[in-house]
Image: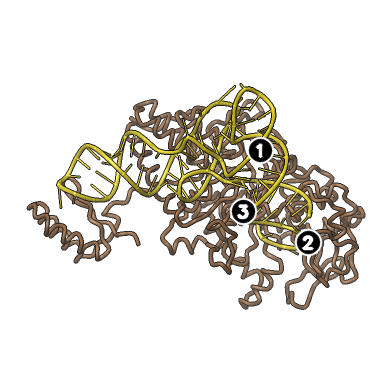
Chain colours: A brown, B yellow
Amino acid sequence: MAARSASTATAARRTGPERDDRLGEAVLAVGLQVHYTLRMRLFDTLTRTERELRPLDGTTFRFYCCGPTVYGPAHIGNFRTFVLQDVLRRALETGGLRSLHVRNITDVDDKTIRDSQQAGQSLADFTAGWTAKFHADCDRLGCLPPHIEPAAVEHIPQQIAMIEVLMAKGHAYAAGDGSVYFKIASFPGYGRLSHLDARDLDLGKTQNTRANSDEYEKDSLSDFVLWKARRPEDGENFWPSPWGAGRPGWHLECSAMIKEYLGDSFDLHSGGVDLVFPHHENEIAQSQCACGGHFAAHWWHITHLLVDGGKMSKSIGNLYTLDDLAARGFSPMEVRYVLIGAHYRKPLNFTLDSLTGAREALAKLAKSARLLAARIDGEPRFEAVDFGTFQAAWDSLQHDLNTPGALGGIFTGLREASTLTGEAAAKALAGLNRVLRALGLTLPEEVTTADVAVPAAIQTLADERWQFRLAKNWAKSDELRAALAAHGWLVKDGKGSYTLTPAEI
RNA sequence: GGCGGGGUAGCCAACCGGUAAGGCAGUGGUUUGCAAAACCACCAUUAAUGGGUUCGAUUCCCAUCCCCGCCUCCA
């Protein structure tokens, strides 16, 4: 039932206009084997090496991304991760590899409970609102909806079942208050992903050890909670379990939903770097102990972004949401361009200036692409493996998802294609479109005067000026141009006519 | 303290053991009455600092100085 409602939600999002589940025209089915041209190398956090991505089942690359906790609007830092994950998926499909993208919604935790109560809403209504907002923002950014988007609350039975298995195998224990903890000492592999020494953790050598009084029930300081006993401040937000009323711990939801939709072993697990420890470390412990599989074959983490060279935070006032940036006149696509403008393993320095730069770059890109398209007779011709002058851009993407390298390759490719005509231009344009699709970039349309409503008074003034200009009365003409500028309108003279555009702030 | 990621032109940012992609900004030119736009061209002998390895290093190694992240429910 839970699974059904999750897939229903997914089905609804499949109808979106940005929906793109074409498997890449490069797919050639030969018997039961599906061949793809992709040669994607990606850095793996666990082994700390670049490894080529190969689907375990030979046909479909199945991956999981830790999704948002829905208690407010996501900010650009969150979106750096989600956009890069979207680029990975698009690149897989561009290379002809089928993908299965699963991303969860965390709709129960301390913050969602606390904020829903403050808002005077039920937890379900509260999180449904912010989930919808998240989906809308993702759509605006051109992110493809995951194939499956399960929510934690809809998978409580699966989480309880996993805890029962862990307890039966001696990996978990119930504390006196009705909470259940994972026993880290029972899993020798703990700390491999984050390269933290489990003994140090246990000895409390870390600096920020919390003297949290409600965790005194634990056997060991580093043991983490699987099931949280109901507390008065939880209100009506609790579920029955063999250990009493309560709710699942955060780490468990991902393990349970992965088991449900991807099984015991799957291709790749991804999230922001901050999730390496403890979240992903804990997931490994839970899932390997409960399921016995290998869990994720590849671990992929996206580095945090900085704003103006420093940490983004609400108190400094540099925490931007898409709406904040829209209020400053920046489009989601400009935001996306900036977010893919740095390699995912390096800190990205987000500034408002970089958004302005992105606008100019996108406009230049769109212009060049239009010029290229104009030199073609008929439709762009698709070539299975030929990216034309954009091969270098595609190669950059395949090499550790080097998005800034790909952007550079696009501009270089455009310059190289600038003299091409006919068939060669058609191939180049097809290559460009494929790289743009892999990056999820949508080029801005040409804005003409017809798109903008010009006030009658301004139009009159501009017409008047045009007459003066035709009469070569430069003084009057310039005077009226200044007057129009004062009203916020820019005049651009062309051969036989002029254009009026609203001046930017 | 432990673990990890960085420091490349005014700004953003890549590749790479053989002497630095790309974008923004800037400069010059063409065009324009002027401007804007567009197009063309130019724009780091140099990669935080100091050593080392090498025929040769920005790229590998060591040290130092900065910046940033994580260290128990933050993407």
Do circles 3 and 2 both sit on a common chain?
A: yes
Q: Label 3 amino acid?
A: His
Q: Chain of mark 2?
A: A
**Label located before the other in sequence (1 or 3):** 1
Depth check: A74 or A197 in front?
A197
Estimate how packed mark 2 is, as few (under 14), some (14 to 19) or many (20 or more) residues with alpha carbons within 10 Å. Answer: few
> Which residue lies at the image location 90% right of the left edge and 70% below the top edge?
A176
Depth check: A67 or A416 in front?
A416
Q: Please identify, in this view, whether the residue under mark 1 or under mark 3 is nearer the observer.
A: 3
Q: Chain of mark 3?
A: A
* Residue placed under numbered mark 2 in the picture: A207
> Which residue lies at the image location 83% right of the left edge and 66% below the top edge?
A241
Could you tell me residue A324's position as x and y percent?
A: 48, 64
Could you tell me residue B55's position as x and y percent?
A: 62, 22
Do circles 1 and 2 both sit on a common chain?
A: yes
User: Could you tell whether A262 is left or right of A130 in the image?
Assistant: right
> Could you tell me which secondary element the residue under label 2 belongs to?
loop
Depth check: A142 or A153 in front?
A142
User: Could you tell whether A291 is left or right of A445 in the image?
Assistant: right
